Amino acid sequence: MSEIIIEPVTRIEGHSKITVQLDDAGEVIDAHFHVTQFRGFERICIGRPIWEMPSLMARICGICPVSHLIASAKACDEILGVEIPPLARRLRRVMNLAQIVQSHALNFFHLSSADLLFGFDGDPSKRSFAGVAEAAPELARDGVALRRFGQQIIERLGGKRIHPAWVVPGGVSSPLEAAQRDAILAEVPDARARARRTLSWYKAHLAGFAEEADQFGNFPSLFMGLVHESGRAAYSDGLLKVVDANGWVLADYVDPKPYWEYLGEQVEPWSYLKSPYFKPLGYPEGLYRVGPLARLNVIDRLGTPSADAELTEYRERLGRYPQSSFHYHWARLIEIVHCIDAIEHILSEPDILDHHVRAQARVNRNEGVGVAEAPRGTLIHHYRVDDHGLVESANLVIATGHNNLAMNAAVKQVARHYIHGRDVAEGVLNRMEAAIRCFDPCLSCSTHALGQMPLVIELRAPDGAVIGEVAR
């Protein structure tokens, strides 16, 4: 038996590797996606007062800090026993939508567009955003501008682009000013034009990737996401819906806060990333996916006319419940269009500048759960506190973690399709990495499982030969 190792997996956020085990004939026996970093934020939280938690949790990630900010604040709202002002709820939603725009733009343009532009067998020296900027400057400029659009909204609301502290227990810390609103609305037409231009470019190139679409994590699974009671997409609030590959509903508009009733969390020795699963089906049969692909599968509609028109075309071409993880890319672009339109709609409401944006209270409960949609999928923060509001325990069920079983299944599917023998082309290795990039994993956010991966130190001679090894 032999092994292929890809380390590190490139163009993703965080540290990981892929291993593929081959039999003596060079056929794939198994494959795994290993998350090799550990951060343990759940332990760091213990002893902190809940009023610090949203700002502290935003530090988990520099790409999706707003998701953690909102989920954490919602858990704190529950502990305080308050109903936050309706305007604060809408302002939180604007910041979350802006983050989805900037995060989706990062994944599509900076991390994935090089494969789509040059092909998965393209010259590795050109497969980067710098290569895209040289070969397709308009595409690159659109990516930079769309990410900037989302980041500037976060900065205008929260005071800074990364790790803002504006979302607080009870609402938000300050109301929206007219100058902030007007500056954001002035930039909407340009952002919308860039998003629609990118969608047209992607749809024109999609037919050239039929084989990848057939192999990049194309398997039946469950799909999970937050949905409004009306059936439209929910990002900051909503009820949980789970459907299977045929659209059969397994959890229909359920309260997401008692997540432990239907989600289990498994720990495997080969990864620091937990493996959540849908409890009624057990482990690992309860594999499910979250994020853009899943959200478009569980909703009836997005809720803005132009995005719903794109969703209709998406379903006409791919079917009502697309199964291939390759289509995360298309779903991401449709969500960008929707988020831009939704931001404009919310900021155009007549009471958006009112000042009642925060409810004040003390600790009224000893437990709280906050659930929101992060760019990568459903995010859960669960805290228990003492009577003084000091955190006694915290459990974070991260969007990337929900997709762990699916990412491993995708790697195995790609490996089995493309690897036959020990002579493996670079483009095949790139496809295995690209299958992971479809999910846009954020590993720094999600590495909280204890794991059992050893620390191995090798002592090598000047010629590279291993002359000693220490393992812990």
Image (cartoon, grey):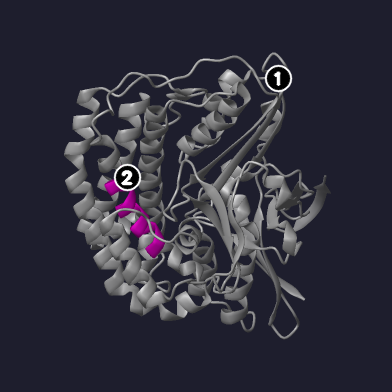
Q: Which mark is residue 147?
A: 2
> Residue 211 in the image: x percent, y percent?
45, 80
Of 412 and 460, nearer the camera is 412
Looking at the picture, tell me which residue is in the foreground, 262 or 161.
262
Q: Secondary structure at mark 2?
A: helix
Amino acid type assigned to the residue bearing label 2 in the image = Arg
Residue 198 lies, in percent from the top left, at 26, 60
Q: CA distance from mark 2 to mark 1?
A: 36 Å
The amino acid marked with disc number 1 is Gly
Judge whether residue 134 can be spotted in this image.
no
Q: Quadrant of residue 251?
A: bottom right
| Residue that sits furthest to the front in the current view | 230
- Relative height, residue 103 to residue 394 (above, below): below
Mark 1, secondary structure of its residue: loop
Residue sticking out furthest to the bottom: 25
Residue stretch in magenta: 330-342
Task: Indicate left or right for 430 with 368 as reference.
Answer: left
Which disc, if any, is residue 47? 1
6 lies above or below 365: below
- In depth, the one of 384 and 423 nearer the eye is 384
399 horizontally vs 449: left or right? left
- Residue 255 at x, y percent in the picture: 60, 45
**Relative depth, front residue between 111 and 243:** 243
Quadrant position of the N terminus in the picture: bottom right
Above-or-below relation of 331 to 218: above
**Callout 1 environment at 10 Å: few (<14), some (14 to 19), or many (20+)?**
some
